[in-house]
Every structure is written in C-alpha cells, then in structure tokens.
C-alpha cells in the first residue's frame, strides 16, 4: 500500500515519465537477479539518463526504503501485540524467564538474582544514522497515520481521514530534502536522542518493571509494595565522546546535561501533575497520614498563597494537594527557582514515597502502588539527569597534556580543553550529583599509566575543584585485550581506585572494543580474542574479590560486533555477566530498537531475560565449558584465518580503493590503522561486499575438520552466534554488484582474492550449519533480504554511475560534479535504508 501511495505521489510531483523510468528500472533489476541480460539492461538504462534524472529516480528508491522499513516496523509491533494475547508468555519474556528460574532455583534463588541485576544501555553519537532528523520525523508522522488506518476500532470515516493524512505525509516525505545541507552539530545529536526518550523510553521503563512485578506475583501486582527492582540504567556518550571529535568541548558537555535534565524534569512534572489531578480521594475515605499532614503544614508555612490556592481547588483532597505541590517543585527545579526546587532526585523520591505510604496506610493500596509507583520507578531510573553522561578521550591526548603540565611549558589549546572538561564535570556533579557524570573512558588503554594520567589531570581541573571519577579502561586492539588483566592488576595499586572501590562495594568497570579489533584481525580472530579477554578478566576479578562489570563496545553492524543483543549475552564467557550487562547502542540502532514503543519494550525484555539466564548458577555440576573443549579447534581456525589476512595484506591496497567519499580518520594518516572502524564498515556495506562481517572466516574454517566444526556450532553459543552473524552478513552481500565496485580500484589480483575468500566462506558456513542456502532457518529475515535486494541493486547501479562521474578526469564541469556528488550521497542514504545498516 505504501509503495502504491509513493508511486501516486511520484507521478503527481515528477510526472508520468519519471514514474515510468522508476518502474522500468525496478522491473529490470528484479529480472536481473536471474537473467544477466536484464542486469545489463538496467546498467544501460541508468547510463542513458542525465544526472538530474538519475537523482530523481534515486530519491524515489530511497523514499521507498524508508516506507518499507516503516511497514516492517509496524508489522513487527502488530505481531508482538498479537503474540502477547496468547495463553502462554512469549519466549525470552520476563514472565517466561521468571517461571523457568523459579522452577530451577526456587523463590530464594530468584530473588537473590534480582537483588544484583542491572541492564545498562549506553547511547552513542557515532555517525551511522544516515537520515536527517526531518526525514525521521516525516516517517514517524506517516507511521502514526498507518497505525490509525490499521486500527480495527476506527470508524469508516476515521479510516478515510487517516488514509488522506497518510498520503499527505508520504507527499511530505517525497518533498523533504534527504541530504543534510549543513554539518550536524553535537547538540543536534543530543536532541535526536531526546526524541527517543520523550516518545519511548520514559513510557516503556515502568511498563517493563510492571511486567517483571506481575511475573513475580501475578495476583496482587499494583496492590502491594513492588517486588521488581528498577534494574535499568541508561548512559550516553552523545555530547561527551570527544575521541577524535574536536567539536565536543567542555561547553558542549555542560550544555548536554542541561538538555537532558530539561527533558526528564518536564516528563516527571507532567506525569506527577497527571496523577495528582486524578487523585481525588477525599479525607473522609482516604485520610492523610500524620507524616503527610506535617509535610502539608510545612508547605502552608513556607508558601501560604500557593497552599491556599491548592486547598481552594482541592478541598479535603490532601493527597491531591500534596502531589500537585510536588509537581510545582519539579517545575521549579526545571526553571532554576532555587527557593522551591528539589535539591536532588532523592528528595523528590522521599515526597513521592511519603504520599505512597499515606495512601497505603489509608487502605488505598491500588492508588499507592499503581500509577504513583510508575513515577517512582521513573525517578529511580532517570533521576534528574535522564542518562549518565560519560566522557571519552584518547589516551594519547592525556599523555601529551600531562607532559606539558609536568614540564611547566605553555599549555596548548588541546591541554586547556582537557582541563576545562575536568572542570565542567566537577560543575555538573555539583549541580546534578556525582552519578550524573562520573565515568571517564580512556580509548586505546595500553598500560596503567594511561589510567593514572586521568586522575592526575583531574587534580589540575579548571576552577580548582577535582571531579570524582570512575576511570574506565577501553581495550581495543588484540594486544591490548591480551594485556588487560595485567593492566587491571596494576590499576588496583592506584590510590584513587582503592578509595573508589571501598566506596562502590568493590565494583569496577572494564570496556572491551569490538570495532577496532575486528578491523585489525577479522571477525573470527577478534571474536576469540574478546572471549579470551572476558574469561581472563573474570578470573582476575574473582581472585581479587572484585565485582566486575564488562562494558561491551559493540557497533550496530555485524563487522563491528553487532547482531542480536540477547544472543550476544548468552555467548559471553561463563561467569562474566554476573547480573550486570552494559553495552553501547550506536547510530541507526538507537532508532531501530527504541523508535517504536512495542519494539523497544521487546528488545529490553529480551536482553534483561538473557542477563538473568546468563547469571543464574547451573542446576548441576557443569560439563567442561565449551570454550575449553573446543579451544584446540578455535586456535586451529584462528591461526588459519590470521594467515589469510597476513597473506592478502590488503592494508595498503584497500587504503587506495576510495570506495566511497573519503572516510573520517583519527589522524592525518592514510593507512587502514588510521581509519575509523565506522567508515571502514560503512564503505564495505555500501559496495555490497560486507567484508568486515566475514573476511578470513572461510580460510579459518577450511583448515579444521568439518565434524569438529559442526560439534562446536551445535554446543558452543559463541561459535554458533559467530557463524549465524556471518551468515547474515553473507546474505546481505551481492557478489555481482561488489565485483563492479572492486573494478573501480583497478587491482584485479586483490579483487580476485577477496571474491575467492567470499566464495570459500559461503561454502564453509553452509557446510558447518548444514543449510542448503543462506538463512535457511530464518525464513522471515531471508524473505525480507530477498525482497529488498533488487531494489538495493537499483540504487547500487545509480551509485556506480555517480562514482564514475566523480572519478572522470575529463568532460565534467563544476555543475555536473555537484549533481554527481548529490546523487552519490542520496544513494548512500538509500542503500543504508535498504540494507538497514551503515557502519
């Protein structure tokens, strides 16, 4: 339906000839999947168009994918709602997990698991959301109308109006510029994340807690004190991650937390106002407790005019009076009225819990533990800062800054910025509390000096007040991952770390980087190195009675550690989860997982369920761990995979391939080691080869006995997830299209090597999994990719046309190059939408 509406809009706006060209290309690429003659026809058709006509056709295909994604999202949400109406709880739901864990470990064992349980997603601003915010908003408005049109309770007139509005929104999407005309600013990224909080997270969190509470005691949830702990915590790097990004300054970091605070305080104010206005129980049926009456008396004394107004509007409704007063104070906190503001979120919780206790004492248990409990859960989860703002910086920056300070030399702009950032963190902690901005991540941690440097620099903070920091090492290369236990051993000797451990119950955090390790040695070797690091760190922590939280820096793309998060939890080294799971949510993944309320709830519920299952003790004495049983096999596969990588040694050749527009780099170097992992993955995704998701895997698998590989696939969750993710990456690869991009590099030997490895990887993965074709056991995903591929082919042909025009040495004027650049960028957005991943 959405495709038909888009065709109608394209015809009305661009004329019937444009629609005819779009349809001609569409039919050619569909038939070109099976007949080479039609593929050549599609190429010739694209070559025959002017660049302007090619741009208009590319816009149509890009819009189509935005609408196709919307249709799939809408369908997923609808299916989830339908399944939840069944007699049994959904697999991987909290209800199913609680039932299973209770049967295995009893009530006491279940409650012990819940007593130390935390799921901690961290949003990042990594530049992998290709869509403009205006495009995202237009798609969301179309989704609202699609929901109304699909609602069986709507009248015929309402459905007609919803369809009219839907066509209008599709028309708006078609006319909205797909490309950004100005550089995205850091606070623009902050506001994009705020939209996810406003529309989804704030509402989903209490729903999830209620689902757990209901699972723990179904008959009386909402009529007793809650059994479900507030297990979600959110973090953000948006506005705090300055590694290689000079636009993230101390001022930006300070402004970011103010924006976050504004949103969460406004949401809490509205929620408290809504509940307060509805709380019309009077003093005769629901008398206030002595404690609440004392609080009302204090209000009368401090602000007699406001108390008189509340009493006039709500006579004898003391609980309502008090909650409306609480809402007033939340507003005062938001606007900076220090006379009436709450000092901290704990003070707000005290007032809310006093209201709750008073209602419960008066026999109004449903009013005490219903909607009011939801607000309490929201305050416990989000505080006054929404998400803890984390700061990240490269270890080399700290080394240079500290050397300048120790030498007494004039401080460079870079060093001043480091110290200004420390001062900004101290100021934010003074205003919002230490937990609002405490974590400081050190990229490319090599040794303990990289961590000690941060603590020393904090002592030189601008303003003279040192912030309270949890310095988190980020181990990214394979060598650093192997050194991580010895670095952590040395970290325990630092005085600030010892003091913090005593205060934090001996909990410490370590971050593992998936992106750069995969770029360095390929997905197979990186996966094994990360697993070994997890196991080694877990053993180290146990030896020192450390409560370890592993922070997984996973990207959205499979080549950067992406894939289903719940499966990733189950594939962790034994004992490494221990009730706590922290992970980055990056780029387009944020909107894919949290843009829709039903999908966001399901995603968080699956991850939470997986964390509980992974943290539960085994029912009986465990067999020898799979990682130990298959260690020899893993080493055999790893060695062969690395040998392929060294033999091909594509670093220099690939750095000259200029697959897309010049990617972002950490420094001015031209080698692959200077190239960020995100543009590295993005470029291979655009050219349809998806190299980072599978390269080296085929050679590794070919070196090991097939029967052993099949056993590992059947019984080792890590190996199973690795191959399933590679299979998905292979399914999104198109060998024919990729070969055309490789031809642009004018290096036939390298092209042949890469394509041979692709063929070998596909053959070996199918042999190990026992599948006849890729994604044989994931029918819906397989269909979705097969249906999309021809349409992505159309955009790839258009992109190749743009690249050839941009690479042409002669015959292209400035205007033609401008149009070609615009065509190229438009196809980048379209291919990203079609494949549903960028970097």
Image (spheres, rainbow, N blue to C red):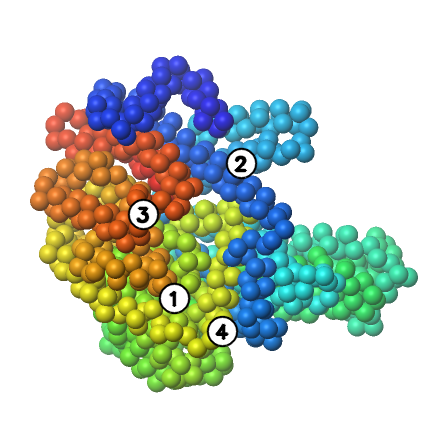
Q: Quadrant of residue 832?
A: top left
> Image check: 498 left or right of 210?
left
- Please name the residue that numbered disc 3 is placed on: 771
Q: Residue at x 70, y 65 (%)?
A: 352
- Marks 2 and 3, the one that precedes in the sequence: 2
Q: What is the C-alpha distance between the residues marked 2 and 3?
A: 37 Å
- Please name the residue that numbered disc 1 is placed on: 572
As drawn, the residue found furthest toward the front would be 707
Q: Are marks 1 and 4 in contact (CB under 8 Å)?
A: no
Marking on residue 328: none
Q: Nearer the viewer, mark 4 or mark 2?
A: 4
Q: Residue at x 12, y 27 (%)?
A: 810
Q: What is the C-alpha distance between the residues marked 4 and 3?
A: 33 Å
- Marks 4 and 2, the one that precedes in the sequence: 2
Q: Are marks 2 and 1 in contact (CB under 8 Å)?
A: no
- Please name the residue that numbered disc 2 is placed on: 143
Number of numbered discs visible in the structure rendering: 4
Task: State the image coordinates of residue 347 (x, y, percent, origin top left).
Answer: 66, 69
| Residue 183 appears anywhere in the view | yes
- Marks 3 and 1, the one that precedes in the sequence: 1
Q: Are marks 4 and 2 in contact (CB under 8 Å)?
A: no
Q: Nearer the viewer, mark 2 or mark 1?
A: 1
């Amino acid at each position: 339906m959405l495709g038909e509406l888009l065709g109608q809009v394209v015809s009305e706006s661009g004329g019937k000839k444009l629609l005819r060209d779009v349809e001609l290309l569409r039919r050619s690429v569909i038939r070109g999947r099976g007949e080479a003659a039609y593929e050549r026809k599609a190429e010739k058709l694209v070559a025959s168009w002017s660049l302007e006509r090619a741009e208009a056709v590319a816009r149509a295909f890009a819009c189509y994918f935005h609408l196709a994604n919307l249709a799939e999202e809408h369908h997923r949400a609808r299916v989830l709602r339908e399944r939840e109406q069944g007699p049994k709880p959904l697999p991987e739901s909290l209800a199913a997990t609680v039932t299973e864990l209770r049967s295995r470990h009893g009530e006491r064992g279940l409650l012990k698991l819940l007593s130390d349980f935390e799921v901690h997603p961290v949003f990042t601003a990594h530049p992998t959301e290709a869509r403009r915010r205006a495009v995202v908003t237009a798609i969301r408005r179309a989704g609202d109308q699609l929901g109304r049109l699909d609602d069986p309770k709507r009248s015929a007139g309402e459905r007609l109006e919803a369809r009219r509005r839907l066509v209008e929104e599709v028309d708006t999407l078609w006319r909205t510029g797909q490309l950004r005309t100005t550089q995205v600013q850091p606070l623009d990224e902050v506001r994009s994340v705020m939209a996810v909080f406003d529309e989804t997270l704030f509402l989903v969190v209490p729903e999830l807690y209620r689902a757990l509470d209901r699972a723990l005691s179904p008959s009386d949830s909402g009529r007793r004190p809650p059994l479900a702990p507030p297990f979600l915590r959110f973090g953000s790097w948006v506005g705090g991650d300055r590694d290689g990004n000079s636009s993230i300054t101390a001022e930006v970091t300070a402004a970011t937390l103010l924006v976050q605070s504004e949103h969460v305080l406004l949401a809490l104010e509205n929620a408290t106002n809504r509940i307060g206005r509805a709380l019309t129980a009077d003093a005769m049926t629901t008398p206030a407790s002595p404690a609440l009456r004392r609080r009302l008396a204090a209000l009368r004394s401090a602000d007699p005019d406001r108390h008189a107004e509340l009493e006039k509007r709500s006579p004898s409704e003391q609980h309502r009076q008090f909650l409306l007063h609480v809402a007033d104070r939340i507003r005062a906190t938001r606007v900076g009225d220090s006379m009436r503001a709450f000092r901290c979120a704990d003070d707000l919780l005290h007032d809310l819990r006093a209201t709750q206790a008073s209602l419960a004492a008066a026999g109004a248990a449903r009013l005490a533990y219903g909607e009011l409990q939801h607000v309490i859960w929201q305050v416990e989860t989000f505080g006054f800062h929404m998400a803890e703002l984390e700061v990240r910086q490269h270890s080399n920056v700290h080394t240079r800054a500290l050397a300048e300070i120790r030498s007494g030399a004039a401080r460079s702009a870079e060093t001043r910025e480091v110290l200004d950032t420390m001062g900004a963190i101290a100021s934010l902690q003074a205003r919002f509390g230490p937990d609002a901005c405490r974590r400081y991540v050190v990229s490319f941690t090599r040794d303990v000096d990289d961590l000690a440097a941060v603590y020393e620099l904090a002592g030189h903070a601008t303003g003279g007040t040192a912030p309270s920091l949890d310095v988190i090492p980020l181990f990214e290369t394979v060598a650093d991952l192997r050194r991580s236990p010895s670095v952590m051993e040395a970290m325990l000797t630092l005085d600030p770390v010892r003091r913090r451990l005593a205060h934090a119950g001996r909990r410490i955090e370590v971050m593992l980087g998936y992106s750069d390790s995969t770029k360095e040695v390929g997905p197979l070797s990186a996966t094994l190195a990360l697993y070994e690091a997890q196991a080694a760190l877990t053993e180290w922590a146990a030896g020192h009675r450390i409560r370890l939280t592993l922070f997984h820096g996973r990207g959205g793309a499979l080549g950067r550690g992406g894939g289903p998060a719940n499966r990733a939890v189950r594939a962790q080294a034994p004992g490494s989860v221990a009730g706590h799971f922290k992970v980055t949510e990056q780029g387009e993944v944020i909107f894919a997982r949290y843009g829709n309320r039903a999908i966001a709830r399901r995603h968080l519920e699956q991850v939470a369920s997986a964390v509980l299952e992974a943290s539960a003790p085994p029912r009986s004495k465990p067999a020898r761990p799979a990682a130990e049983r298959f260690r020899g096999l893993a080493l055999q596969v790893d060695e062969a995979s690395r040998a392929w990588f060294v033999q091909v040694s594509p670093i220099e050749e690939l750095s000259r391939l200029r697959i897309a527009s010049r990617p972002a780099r950490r420094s001015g170097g031209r080698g692959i080691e200077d190239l960020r992992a995100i543009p590295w993955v993005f470029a291979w995704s655009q050219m349809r080869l998806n190299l980072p998701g599978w390269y080296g895997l085929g050679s590794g698998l070919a070196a090991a006995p097939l029967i052993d590989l099949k056993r590992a696939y059947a019984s080792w969750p890590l190996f199973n997830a690795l191959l399933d993710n590679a299979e998905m990456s292979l399914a999104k690869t198109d060998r024919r299209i990729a070969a055309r991009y490789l031809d642009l590099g004018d290096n036939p030997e390298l092209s042949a090597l890469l394509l041979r490895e692709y063929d070998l990887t596909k053959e070996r993965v199918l042999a190990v999994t026992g599948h006849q074709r890729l994604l044989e056991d994931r029918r819906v995903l397989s269909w979705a990719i097969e249906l999309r591929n021809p349409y992505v082919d159309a955009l790839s042909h258009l992109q190749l046309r743009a690249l050839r025009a941009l690479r042409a040495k002669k015959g292209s004027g400035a205007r033609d190059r401008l149009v070609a650049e615009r065509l190229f960028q438009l196809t980048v957005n379209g291919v990203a939408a079609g494949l549903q991943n960028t970097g």
